[in-house]
Image: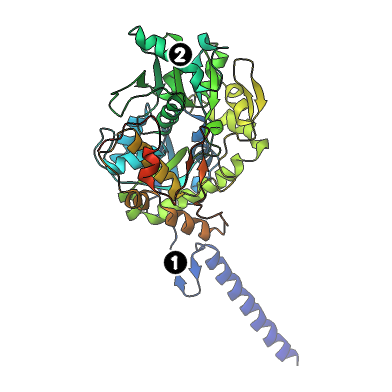
């Protein structure tokens, strides 16, 4: 009996030792190990350079980098600040950048070869944020123009008649700030000109975001559209005031995206999905209001936005001082994850194409369906979110209402919508 017990004990010890050794061996394997088969879900490329412009909505990329979230998903990240949107586009095109913070209109224009750049297909598998931009006017217009662009028209008409047209700035011709500025002016009966400036009542110029305030300070412009914190900074520096926020023009409008070249996304699908997974975590973190002070402190650094954190923080918290006596709490402040923010909705590309058509960026009607399918890659987004078990809100084709009473129906006639505006520059 004693001998039998001893044999059992030795056998049990051997089994425990074998199990422990196997456990140690298995603990070193990646999560993709399933049974006797190994599914490698690691990125094809680990070293990635991310581009960004000095705007508050670069935050999800910066936070994913600073908090090690890219690294968590196998990405060794570098973040590089670009001097302008054109520089960012060119760096992505030539692979100096592999992914970048970008205006939603830029991958669309690049894919179509619009805006003076070589045709380079790009994809949008991730929307970075909604809301949070604004239109700033010079302080001399305080008390004369509030949020209604119709009040601006007499000043525009007077300046034009005197041979000194008013000057307004945006950040990139097919980009978001350009379209918000064009939409705002046209809603006030002011023609911003076609893609080449023809028929304009004003002069529309391109200025990089961080240079907006300095250019207005020296009298180079009468107004501009840009992302934060530069609208808030114009008030701090007492050179301008906010006429209207972009969320007041279109609640929860699309804004920046994380873009890749189509070539890179096709060759590195697991790398792209790893980026999206990290951005998902950083975006969730950003939309917790208790984290926004830390966010402002991090992104305010000289390597990123280079602006005092207190100038960034207020509007991130929905606290709006418009600089002309109007103050309010805005529930529609900048978001990074909430309300299905990140899903690359097809309708946003469709709307952009109608505006490119409206302002003469295209000769004739663009292929609304084909371009949208090529650029807006919901398939990549959905696959990445499925792998981490995140239940997103899915595709949305509900109509969108803008502040001038216009309603965009993504199931409707795109050409009819583009032609429906009183002020337009359609090219046959």
- Is residue 72 or residue 383 the one in the foreground? 383
Tell me which residue sits at (68%, 36%) in the image.
290
> Image height check: is 278 above or below 391?
above
Residue 59 placed where, x, y %?
52, 35
Relative depth, front residue between 6 and 143: 143
Q: Which mark sits nearer the N-terminus, 2 or 1?
A: 1
Which residue is more in the foreground, 125 or 45?
Answer: 125
Element marked by disc 2: helix
Q: Is residue 416 left or right of residue 244?
A: left
Mark 2–mark 1 distance (CA, rounded to whole Å): 66 Å
- Visible residue check, residue 75: no
Asked if residue 165 lies left or right of residue 309, the reply is: left
From where the camera sits, is residue 201 visible? yes
Which residue is identified by label 1?
Answer: 39
Residue behind mark 2:
154
Look at the image and name its color scheme. Answer: rainbow
Percent from the top left, x then y, of residue 47?
39, 45
Q: Are marks 2 and 1 in contact (CB under 8 Å)?
A: no
Residue 308: which disc?
none
Q: Residue furthest top?
A: 162
Residue at the spot 54% in from the left edge and 25% down from the top edge = 244
In the picture, the quarter occupied by the C terminus is top left
Left of 227 or right of it: where is 349?
left
Q: Secondary structure at mark 1?
A: loop
Q: Does 292 sit above or below residue 43?
A: above
Image vertical order of residue 68 relative to residue 179, above or below: below
**Percent coordinates x, y for residue 313 in the rendering:** 61, 27
């Amino acid at each position: 009996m004693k001998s039998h017990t001893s044999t059992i004990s030795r056998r049990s010890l051997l089994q425990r030792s074998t199990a422990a050794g196997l456990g140690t061996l298995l603990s070193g394997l990646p999560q993709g190990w399933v049974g006797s088969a190994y599914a490698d879900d690691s990125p094809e490329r680990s070293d990635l350079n991310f581009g960004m412009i000095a705007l508050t909505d670069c935050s999800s990329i910066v936070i994913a980098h600073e908090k090690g979230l890219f690294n968590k998903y196998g990405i060794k990240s570098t973040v590089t600040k670009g001097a302008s949107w054109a520089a960012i586009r060119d760096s992505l095109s030539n692979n100096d950048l592999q992914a970048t913070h970008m205006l939603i209109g830029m991958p669309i224009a690049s894919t179509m070869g619009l805006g003076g750049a070589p045709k380079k297909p790009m994809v949008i598998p991730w929307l970075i944020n909604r809301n949070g931009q604004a239109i700033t006017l010079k302080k001399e217009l305080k008390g004369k123009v509030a949020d209604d662009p119709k009040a601006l028209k007499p000043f525009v008409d007077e300046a034009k008649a005197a041979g000194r047209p008013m000057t307004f700035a945006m950040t990139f011709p097919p980009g978001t700030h350009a379209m918000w500025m064009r939409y705002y002016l046209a809603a006030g009966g002011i023609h911003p000109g076609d893609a080449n400036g023809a028929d304009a009542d004003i002069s529309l110029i391109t200025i990089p975001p961080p240079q907006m305030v300095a250019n207005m300070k020296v009298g180079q412009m009468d107004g501009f559209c840009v992302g934060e914190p530069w609208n808030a900074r114009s008030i701090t520096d007492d050179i301008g005031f906010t006429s209207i926020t972009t969320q007041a023009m279109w609640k929860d409008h699309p804004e920046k995206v994380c873009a890749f070249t189509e070539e890179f996304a096709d060759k590195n699908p697991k790398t792209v999905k790893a980026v999206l997974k990290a951005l998902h975590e950083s975006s969730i973190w950003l939309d917790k209001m208790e984290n926004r002070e830390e966010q402002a402190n991090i992104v305010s650094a000289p390597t990123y936005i280079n602006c005092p954190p207190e100038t960034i923080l207020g509007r991130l918290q929905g606290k709006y001082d418009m600089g002309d006596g109007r103050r309010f709490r805005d529930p529609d402040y900048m978001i990074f994850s909430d309300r299905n923010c990140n899903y690359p909705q097809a309708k946003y590309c469709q709307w952009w194409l109608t505006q490119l058509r409206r302002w003469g960026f295209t000769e004739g009607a663009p292929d609304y369906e084909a371009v949208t399918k090529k650029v807006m890659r919901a398939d990549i987004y959905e696959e990445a979110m499925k792998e981490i078990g995140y239940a997103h809100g899915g595709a949305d084709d509900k109509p969108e209402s803008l502040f001038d009473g216009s309603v965009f129906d993504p199931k409707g006639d795109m050409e009819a919508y583009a032609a429906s505006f009183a002020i337009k520059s359609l090219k046959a």
